[in-house]
Amino acid sequence: MRPFPLPPFVEERLPSGLTLRAARWGKRPSVAAALLFPGAGSVSAPEGLEGLAEVVADTFLDGTHSRSSRELAEAIDDLALSCDVSAGYDSAVAHMAILERDLDAGLSLFAEVLAQPAFREEEVDRNRRRHVDSLREQRSEPDFLGRERLLAELYPGHPYGRLAATEKGLTSLTAADVQRFFSSRFTFTNATLVLVGPGDEGTLLSAAARAFRTAAPGATPAWAPPSPPAPRSGLSFHLIDRKEAVQTNLLFARPALRRADPLFVAAVVANQSLGGGASSRLFHVLREERGLTYGTYSSVAPRLTAGHFGASIDCRTDATREALAGLLDLIRAFAAEGPTKEEHARSRRYLTGSFAISHETPGALVQDELTRILHGLPEDAWQTWRERVDRVTREEARDVAARFFSPDIGVVTAVGQAAVIRPVLESFGETTVWDADGPQV
Amino acid sequence: MAPQPGVPVVTIDVTYDVGSRVEPPGKTGFAHLFEHLMFEGSENVGKGEHFRRVAEAGGVMNGTTSEDRTNYFETLPSESLDLGLFLEADRMRALVLTQEKLDNQRLAVKEEKRLRIDNQPYASSFETVDALAFDCFAYRHPVIGSMEDLDAASLEDAADFYRRYYAPGNALLCLAGDLDPKGAFESVRRTFGAVPAREVPTPFAVTEPPQAGERRDERTDPHAALPALHVVFKAPPRRHPDLLALTYAEKILGGGESSRLWRRLVKDEEKALSLSLSVDERRGPSLFRIFSVLRPGTRLEELEEDVRRGLETFAAEGPTPAEMERARRMFLSGAVRATQTTQSVAFLLSEYGLYDRDADLWREDFAALLDVTAAEVRDAAARTFVPLRTTVVTVVPDGREG
């Protein structure tokens, strides 16, 4: 295996508690940065205020103490600063990218956005209304309908089970809720700013220190990650009736493992053999041999305290039975037998070799570092990643597949014409039918 | 060849001078269907082996078909350059076509069409726009084609297409990344040098009569929850000075949260849920596109009037100096970010190399872009945003919403 050394991160901590981490990477004069706020994601929104984290994240860009929404937008565009704040499940992240020559001005504006947001009532209301209307548009997309039901059934009653805001939550939340969520969750005490660019790490750190030196620390957020969801049993089938569908979109998922689980690396290697790409088993059999689909893939999707394994296939309506049986049979066989020797060797080579390809840009290193920090992974997690992938044995891949991929438990969702495919789903197991607008039929 | 020291990876791109524009009526979707067949094996590479060998080398690969060209690429750890060159040369020299492969990929492509177009809200309305805006068949029909034409595609069609368009003289090979130019040239000679010359097709020209009046259509979309609006203008081909100027109009009117139309219609007045502007740059006539999904309660006529009035004002008054400066900085920053990967560099050079026979011409164009003046932007907008060149397609949800 050819060495591919990643740069070390240099760290500094500001009096506010904000941790700065910088690394030198890339040849083009552009700097990528991101500020991670653990605990500021959707899992922290109080019950009944679903959508709060998303609205807070959006409203950062709608004005600061000294600038209106429009003035801030102009200042951002004047610098060609790429800047956004987004809420995930376990954290919120603010991303920025800027030409290296404009780094000081870009970081200064980025700090203003994050440390002095105005959260004016009219802007909160505006974003709330937009989220409500967006939900309506999203419900016309088959992928949204499938994932919404899949997560709700996979993590019942758990914050990981919510794909998007809810109309009820959005209409209930107020500007005061937004301000409260900001004050309690977006504090610099346990936040980390990661910067990667082609220049010296010291220069990045001092530019960041200058920009964020006046930011107040805020209270230390008392945040406990969500408890893991309750274990589930059996395989349940859910059909979302999209009457005008010309295709069936099938998803399967089952509980698997969290990112920090020591078996995660073996799960990634095993998944690559089953459904990681065009050379994997699902794609080869279901598309290249049987012509059932354009693409079929599987993946492991970790959260902070849980995670799931999932697979997907889209097929013509009259091939729903064959596609679903094919998908579940292949997963079942893989969970029982694991990868072949050839598949396993190819997956290890693919994952170790393509690592460099996915790390051409500073932004890719920023993303990896955020993952490492959020999930509490060791300092050398990415430096040692390729070696750890390479060391996974075929037996380990088989064992992890047996434990985490088997479709004996989990959820299957089908988005399509219920009038045609309901009997098909019912032949697999008891099926709950849902309206595309949400409620159970 | 663009050596870029840094991360030890290399992108190999082979772009063929064939896109959906060459398809005659009855053969739509064929260029793209054929792209799928190029992954199905050649004389020394079995079915499925292309995917497997690239993965085994730690590489990624794909192909894309547009109206104007088809490209194939592999990004590989740089020590596997020879593998990528071998795979590309082998399928250029001796692709193996069978009825079974054609039937299999026909099914995959039809499913792709359902996935991307037929089963999605708004997607088919983009096909309506092209069919209405263009007179030439080359650009009137969609790259993905029609189900009927895909069903009718035969093995003879495939063999003929390969013979006609996949000649080495009709392709451009571009390498970008961690390369030793001398060694790489030797590898290219060793692999592609063995591909015999074949007859090269005569250059394809798109001729489009001037549009003589506004065109309109209304579509009912069974998948859409909210109405949507397309306002589209016929524009000159790529590299035309007006098209460069129109990229400023795109940024100033719809690029970024401070842009004029986006700010007003999406943010301030809350009439649109989304509003995107784009210059759909083509070798033949291009399109300046505006697409917007409406907020509930907004009438289509009202939004269209707002969009058209915004464009008229822009065409009459032109951009402000601050807007020009902002756009320039966005171009510069965008260009730096868009050339961070070997793949994006290879794509950029391939386009100029194939279309203009001069891969380095992008530098000239980029310098020209930064030199565009506010008056040139205003004048290009005034020439383009005129009723005679306009195509409007409205999308109305069918059923519960709307």
Image: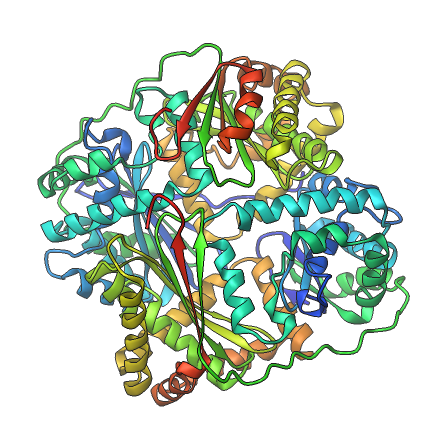
Near-viewer residue (A122 or A359) = A122
Residue A68 on image: x %, y %: 14, 61
Near-viewer residue (B18 or A246) = A246
Residue A26 on image: x %, y %: 49, 56
Q: Is residue A198 above or below residue A340?
A: below
* Residue at 35% from the left image edge and 19% from the top image edge: A156
Q: Residue furthest top?
A: A233
Q: Is residue A228 above or below residue A20?
A: above
| Horizontal side of residue B166 vs B357, given as left or right | right
What color scheme is it?
rainbow
Q: Quadrant of the C terminus of chain A?
A: top left
Q: Is residue B306 above or below residue A55?
A: below
* Residue at 46% from the left image edge and 38% from the top image edge: A143
Near-viewer residue (B390 or B341) = B390
* Residue at 68% from the left image edge and 32% from the top image edge: A286
Residue A56 on image: x %, y %: 21, 43
Is residue B380 in view from this perspective?
yes
Is residue A406 in view from this perspective?
no
Residue A327 on image: x %, y %: 62, 26
* Residue at 37% from the left image edge and 43% from the top image edge: A138
Near-viewer residue (B284 or B155) = B155
